[in-house]
Amino acid sequence: MQQHEIPLEEQINHLHQQLRQAQKMAALGELASTTTHEFNNVLMTILNYAKLGLRHDDKPTRDKALTKILTAAQRAEKVTNGVLGLARNRGTEKSPTDLVALTRQSLVLLEREMHKYRIQVETDFEQTRNANVCGNQIQQVLLNLLTNARQAIGQSGRITIRIAENQTSGTVDLSIRDTGSGIPQEKLPKIFDRFYSTKQGPDASGKGGTGLGLAMCRDIIEEHRGRIRVESKVGMGTAFTLMLPVATEEASTTTVPIPKLGVPNQANMGTASSLPS
Ligand SMILES: Nc1ncnc2c1ncn2[C@@H]1O[C@H](COP(=O)(O)OP(=O)(O)O)[C@@H](O)[C@H]1O
Ligand SMILES: [Mg+2]
Protein backbone atom coordinates (compact mmCIF):
# COMPACT_ATOMS: atom_id res chain seq x y z
CA MET A 1 0.00 0.00 0.00
CA GLN A 2 1.29 3.39 -0.91
CA GLN A 3 1.55 5.97 1.80
CA HIS A 4 0.75 9.56 1.04
CA GLU A 5 3.24 11.77 2.72
CA ILE A 6 1.84 15.15 3.73
CA PRO A 7 4.49 17.78 3.06
CA LEU A 8 6.20 18.88 6.26
CA GLU A 9 5.31 22.50 5.74
CA GLU A 10 1.63 21.61 5.44
CA GLN A 11 1.81 19.55 8.61
CA ILE A 12 3.40 22.42 10.48
CA ASN A 13 0.76 24.82 9.24
CA HIS A 14 -1.94 22.44 10.31
CA LEU A 15 -0.45 22.04 13.78
CA HIS A 16 -0.03 25.76 14.09
CA GLN A 17 -3.71 26.28 13.30
CA GLN A 18 -4.66 23.68 15.88
CA LEU A 19 -2.57 25.46 18.49
CA ARG A 20 -4.22 28.77 17.74
CA GLN A 21 -7.57 27.07 18.11
CA ALA A 22 -6.52 25.56 21.45
CA GLN A 23 -5.44 28.99 22.64
CA LYS A 24 -8.79 30.46 21.67
CA MET A 25 -10.67 27.69 23.44
CA ALA A 26 -8.60 28.16 26.59
CA ALA A 27 -9.31 31.90 26.54
CA LEU A 28 -13.02 31.32 26.00
CA GLY A 29 -13.11 28.80 28.82
CA GLU A 30 -11.59 31.31 31.21
CA LEU A 31 -13.99 33.99 30.06
CA ALA A 32 -16.95 31.67 30.60
CA SER A 33 -15.68 30.96 34.08
CA THR A 34 -15.31 34.67 34.89
CA THR A 35 -18.79 35.57 33.72
CA THR A 36 -20.44 32.61 35.40
CA HIS A 37 -18.92 33.60 38.73
CA GLU A 38 -19.82 37.25 38.27
CA PHE A 39 -23.35 36.39 37.29
CA ASN A 40 -23.87 33.97 40.09
CA ASN A 41 -22.90 36.68 42.49
CA VAL A 42 -25.30 39.22 41.01
CA LEU A 43 -28.05 36.62 40.96
CA MET A 44 -27.57 35.89 44.67
CA THR A 45 -27.95 39.58 45.47
CA ILE A 46 -31.11 39.85 43.40
CA LEU A 47 -32.63 36.70 44.94
CA ASN A 48 -31.87 37.73 48.50
CA TYR A 49 -33.23 41.25 48.15
CA ALA A 50 -36.33 40.06 46.29
CA LYS A 51 -37.03 37.70 49.20
CA LEU A 52 -36.42 40.50 51.69
CA GLY A 53 -38.79 42.81 49.83
CA LEU A 54 -41.50 40.17 49.80
CA ARG A 55 -41.13 39.39 53.48
CA HIS A 56 -41.58 43.00 54.58
CA ASP A 57 -44.39 45.20 53.42
CA ASP A 58 -43.14 48.52 54.78
CA LYS A 59 -42.13 51.00 52.10
CA PRO A 60 -38.55 51.75 53.31
CA THR A 61 -37.54 48.07 53.28
CA ARG A 62 -39.10 47.50 49.88
CA ASP A 63 -37.44 50.60 48.47
CA LYS A 64 -34.10 49.47 49.80
CA ALA A 65 -34.59 45.99 48.32
CA LEU A 66 -35.55 47.40 44.94
CA THR A 67 -32.57 49.76 44.91
CA LYS A 68 -30.21 46.86 45.64
CA ILE A 69 -31.85 44.80 42.91
CA LEU A 70 -31.48 47.66 40.46
CA THR A 71 -27.79 48.15 41.28
CA ALA A 72 -27.15 44.43 40.90
CA ALA A 73 -28.95 44.33 37.57
CA GLN A 74 -26.95 47.32 36.33
CA ARG A 75 -23.78 45.51 37.26
CA ALA A 76 -24.96 42.45 35.35
CA GLU A 77 -25.55 44.70 32.37
CA LYS A 78 -21.97 46.02 32.54
CA VAL A 79 -20.58 42.50 32.70
CA THR A 80 -22.59 41.38 29.66
CA ASN A 81 -21.53 44.45 27.74
CA GLY A 82 -17.90 43.60 28.41
CA VAL A 83 -18.33 40.02 27.30
CA LEU A 84 -20.50 40.87 24.33
CA GLY A 85 -17.79 43.20 23.15
CA LEU A 86 -15.43 40.24 23.14
CA ALA A 87 -17.88 37.79 21.64
CA ARG A 88 -19.35 40.09 19.00
CA ASN A 89 -16.10 41.31 17.65
CA ARG A 90 -14.10 38.18 17.01
CA GLY A 91 -12.39 39.76 14.05
CA THR A 92 -8.86 41.03 13.96
CA GLU A 93 -9.52 44.44 12.43
CA LYS A 94 -7.57 47.25 14.07
CA SER A 95 -9.03 50.64 14.75
CA PRO A 96 -8.16 53.69 16.90
CA THR A 97 -8.92 52.54 20.44
CA ASP A 98 -8.91 54.24 23.81
CA LEU A 99 -6.82 51.90 25.95
CA VAL A 100 -7.97 53.55 29.17
CA ALA A 101 -11.62 52.78 28.40
CA LEU A 102 -10.73 49.27 27.25
CA THR A 103 -8.82 48.60 30.47
CA ARG A 104 -11.67 49.91 32.62
CA GLN A 105 -14.05 47.59 30.80
CA SER A 106 -11.74 44.64 31.40
CA LEU A 107 -11.50 45.47 35.09
CA VAL A 108 -15.28 45.32 35.47
CA LEU A 109 -15.11 41.68 34.45
CA LEU A 110 -12.58 40.88 37.16
CA GLU A 111 -13.90 43.10 39.94
CA ARG A 112 -15.46 40.32 42.04
CA GLU A 113 -12.55 38.00 41.56
CA MET A 114 -10.03 40.59 42.68
CA HIS A 115 -12.20 41.37 45.68
CA LYS A 116 -12.50 37.70 46.56
CA TYR A 117 -8.71 37.26 46.65
CA ARG A 118 -8.29 40.59 48.48
CA ILE A 119 -6.36 42.18 45.66
CA GLN A 120 -6.21 45.91 45.54
CA VAL A 121 -6.16 47.25 42.01
CA GLU A 122 -4.58 50.66 41.56
CA THR A 123 -4.75 52.59 38.34
CA ASP A 124 -2.65 55.45 37.08
CA PHE A 125 -4.12 56.46 33.74
CA GLU A 126 -2.88 59.32 31.65
CA GLN A 127 -5.13 60.57 28.88
CA THR A 128 -3.34 59.31 25.80
CA ARG A 129 -3.99 59.31 22.09
CA ASN A 130 -5.76 56.24 20.75
CA ALA A 131 -3.78 53.14 19.96
CA ASN A 132 -4.22 51.31 16.68
CA VAL A 133 -5.40 47.95 18.00
CA CYS A 134 -8.01 45.27 17.76
CA GLY A 135 -9.95 45.94 20.96
CA ASN A 136 -11.17 42.43 21.67
CA GLN A 137 -7.71 40.95 21.23
CA ILE A 138 -6.06 43.46 23.52
CA GLN A 139 -8.81 42.89 26.06
CA GLN A 140 -7.92 39.19 26.03
CA VAL A 141 -4.29 40.07 26.62
CA LEU A 142 -5.31 42.25 29.58
CA LEU A 143 -7.52 39.55 31.08
CA ASN A 144 -4.66 37.05 30.76
CA LEU A 145 -2.07 39.31 32.34
CA LEU A 146 -4.41 40.38 35.15
CA THR A 147 -5.34 36.78 35.91
CA ASN A 148 -1.68 35.74 35.97
CA ALA A 149 -0.93 38.64 38.30
CA ARG A 150 -3.80 37.67 40.58
CA GLN A 151 -2.62 34.06 40.67
CA ALA A 152 0.98 35.04 41.39
CA ILE A 153 -0.26 37.03 44.40
CA GLY A 154 -2.48 34.32 45.81
CA GLN A 155 -4.18 36.13 48.66
CA SER A 156 -3.76 39.82 49.45
CA GLY A 157 -1.62 42.04 47.36
CA ARG A 158 -1.63 44.84 44.89
CA ILE A 159 -1.83 45.19 41.13
CA THR A 160 -0.89 48.53 39.62
CA ILE A 161 -1.92 49.36 36.08
CA ARG A 162 -0.34 52.32 34.40
CA ILE A 163 -1.11 53.79 30.99
CA ALA A 164 0.95 56.55 29.43
CA GLU A 165 2.02 57.70 26.03
CA ASN A 166 5.62 57.12 25.07
CA GLN A 167 6.70 59.95 22.76
CA THR A 168 10.04 58.36 21.93
CA SER A 169 8.64 55.13 20.56
CA GLY A 170 5.31 56.49 19.32
CA THR A 171 3.44 53.99 21.45
CA VAL A 172 0.88 53.87 24.19
CA ASP A 173 2.49 51.91 27.01
CA LEU A 174 0.45 49.87 29.44
CA SER A 175 2.06 48.17 32.39
CA ILE A 176 0.64 45.69 34.86
CA ARG A 177 2.71 45.31 37.99
CA ASP A 178 1.98 42.83 40.75
CA THR A 179 3.29 42.19 44.23
CA GLY A 180 3.24 38.43 43.62
CA SER A 181 5.78 35.63 43.79
CA GLY A 182 7.98 36.87 40.97
CA ILE A 183 9.67 34.68 38.37
CA PRO A 184 13.20 33.29 38.77
CA GLN A 185 15.62 34.78 36.25
CA GLU A 186 16.34 31.41 34.62
CA LYS A 187 12.62 30.77 34.03
CA LEU A 188 11.99 34.10 32.28
CA PRO A 189 12.98 32.81 28.81
CA LYS A 190 10.39 30.02 29.12
CA ILE A 191 7.26 31.84 30.17
CA PHE A 192 6.11 32.75 26.65
CA ASP A 193 6.52 29.15 25.44
CA ARG A 194 3.35 27.28 24.64
CA PHE A 195 2.36 24.84 27.39
CA TYR A 196 4.89 26.19 29.87
CA SER A 197 3.05 26.42 33.16
CA THR A 198 4.00 26.16 36.80
CA LYS A 199 0.36 25.69 37.79
CA GLN A 200 -1.20 22.35 38.65
CA GLY A 201 -4.32 23.02 36.60
CA PRO A 202 -7.22 25.45 36.71
CA ASP A 203 -7.61 27.14 40.10
CA ALA A 204 -10.81 27.53 42.13
CA SER A 205 -11.90 30.24 39.71
CA GLY A 206 -11.33 27.96 36.70
CA LYS A 207 -8.25 29.73 35.41
CA GLY A 208 -4.71 28.90 34.42
CA GLY A 209 -2.70 25.74 34.05
CA THR A 210 -2.75 25.52 30.27
CA GLY A 211 0.44 27.43 29.66
CA LEU A 212 -1.25 29.07 26.69
CA GLY A 213 -2.00 32.51 28.14
CA LEU A 214 1.30 34.26 27.55
CA ALA A 215 1.84 32.50 24.23
CA MET A 216 -1.42 34.01 23.08
CA CYS A 217 -0.46 37.43 24.44
CA ARG A 218 2.79 37.27 22.55
CA ASP A 219 1.11 36.27 19.28
CA ILE A 220 -1.43 39.08 19.59
CA ILE A 221 1.15 41.74 20.42
CA GLU A 222 3.36 40.53 17.58
CA GLU A 223 0.44 40.88 15.16
CA HIS A 224 0.06 44.43 16.39
CA ARG A 225 3.73 45.17 15.77
CA GLY A 226 3.97 46.02 19.39
CA ARG A 227 6.17 44.80 22.19
CA ILE A 228 5.62 42.87 25.36
CA ARG A 229 8.30 43.00 28.02
CA VAL A 230 8.65 41.49 31.42
CA GLU A 231 10.63 42.41 34.50
CA SER A 232 10.55 40.29 37.59
CA LYS A 233 12.20 39.71 40.89
CA VAL A 234 11.50 36.72 43.11
CA GLY A 235 9.68 37.74 46.26
CA MET A 236 9.05 41.25 44.95
CA GLY A 237 6.75 40.85 41.99
CA THR A 238 6.46 41.09 38.25
CA ALA A 239 5.70 43.79 35.73
CA PHE A 240 4.53 43.20 32.17
CA THR A 241 4.62 46.15 29.80
CA LEU A 242 2.78 46.36 26.50
CA MET A 243 3.85 48.92 23.94
CA LEU A 244 1.22 49.50 21.28
CA PRO A 245 1.46 51.79 18.24
CA VAL A 246 -0.36 55.09 18.45
CA ALA A 247 -3.15 55.40 15.88
CA THR A 248 -1.77 58.02 13.55
CA GLU A 249 -3.43 59.09 10.33
CA GLU A 250 -0.83 57.13 8.41
CA ALA A 251 -1.78 54.04 10.37
CA SER A 252 -5.43 54.33 9.47
CA THR A 253 -4.84 54.94 5.78
CA THR A 254 -2.10 52.26 5.79
CA THR A 255 -0.17 54.04 3.05
CA VAL A 256 2.81 54.47 5.32
CA PRO A 257 4.07 51.34 7.09
CA ILE A 258 4.06 51.46 10.87
CA PRO A 259 7.60 50.96 12.20
CA LYS A 260 8.06 47.42 13.39
CA LEU A 261 8.79 47.39 17.08
CA GLY A 262 8.87 43.62 17.32
CA VAL A 263 8.61 41.34 20.28
CA PRO A 264 11.89 41.02 22.13
CA ASN A 265 13.56 37.71 21.48
CA GLN A 266 14.05 35.18 24.21
CA ALA A 267 17.63 36.14 24.82
CA ASN A 268 16.49 39.65 25.64
CA MET A 269 13.84 38.34 27.93
CA GLY A 270 16.36 36.23 29.79
CA THR A 271 18.21 39.35 30.73
CA ALA A 272 15.06 41.18 31.73
CA SER A 273 16.10 43.41 34.53
CA SER A 274 14.89 43.35 38.08
CA LEU A 275 12.16 45.60 39.33
CA PRO A 276 13.20 49.07 40.27
CA SER A 277 12.73 49.45 44.01
N1 LIG B 1 2.57 37.80 36.90
C1 LIG B 1 3.23 36.64 37.04
N2 LIG B 1 3.94 36.39 38.18
C2 LIG B 1 4.62 35.22 38.32
N3 LIG B 1 4.67 34.25 37.38
C3 LIG B 1 3.99 34.45 36.24
C4 LIG B 1 3.25 35.65 35.99
N4 LIG B 1 2.70 35.57 34.77
C5 LIG B 1 3.08 34.37 34.27
N5 LIG B 1 3.86 33.69 35.13
C6 LIG B 1 4.49 32.37 34.92
O1 LIG B 1 4.40 32.05 33.54
C7 LIG B 1 3.72 30.80 33.36
C8 LIG B 1 2.97 30.81 32.06
O2 LIG B 1 1.86 31.70 32.10
P1 LIG B 1 0.64 31.45 31.13
O3 LIG B 1 1.16 31.31 29.75
O4 LIG B 1 -0.39 32.49 31.37
O5 LIG B 1 0.09 30.02 31.56
P2 LIG B 1 -0.75 29.56 32.85
O6 LIG B 1 -1.30 30.79 33.51
O7 LIG B 1 -1.82 28.67 32.29
O8 LIG B 1 0.23 28.81 33.73
C9 LIG B 1 2.87 30.64 34.61
O9 LIG B 1 2.55 29.30 34.89
C10 LIG B 1 3.77 31.27 35.67
O10 LIG B 1 4.74 30.35 36.11
MG1 LIG C 1 -2.25 32.40 32.52
Image (cartoon, helix red, strand yellow):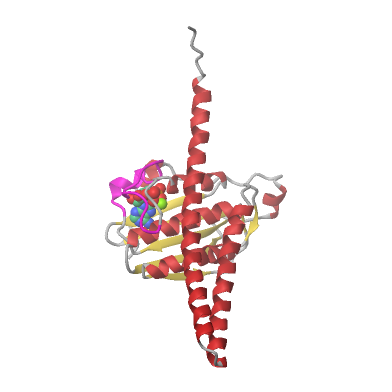
Q: In the figure, 261 relative to 118: above or below? A: above
Q: Residue at x 45, y 68 (%)?
A: 112
Report whether residue 160 is seen: no
Q: Position of residue 270 (x, y in %)?
A: 34, 45
Q: In the figure, 265 relative to 117: above or below? A: above
Q: Residue at x 29, y 49 (%)?
A: 185
Q: Is residue 193 magenta?
A: yes
Q: Residue furthest top?
A: 1
Q: In the figure, 1 relative to 64: above or below? A: above
Q: Which quarter shows the C terminus?
A: bottom left
Main SS category, magenta section: loop
Q: Position of residue 72 (x, y in %)?
A: 54, 74
Q: Residue at x 51, y 88 (%)?
A: 56
Q: Position of residue 74 (x, y in %)?
A: 59, 73
Residue closer to the observer: 181 or 50 = 50
* Occupied quadrant, residue 73: bottom right
Numbered label tally: 0
Residue closer to the observer: 85 or 92 = 85
Q: Position of residue 209 (x, y in %)?
A: 37, 48
Q: In the figure, 229 relative to 190: above or below? A: below
Residue closer to the observer: 45 or 168 = 45
Residue closer to the observer: 204 or 96 = 204
Q: Is residue 37 magenta?
A: no
The stretch in magenta equals 183-205
Report whether residue 138 is seen: yes
Instruction: Judge from the rendering whether residue 158 lies leftward or rightward of residue 86; answer left or right.
Output: left
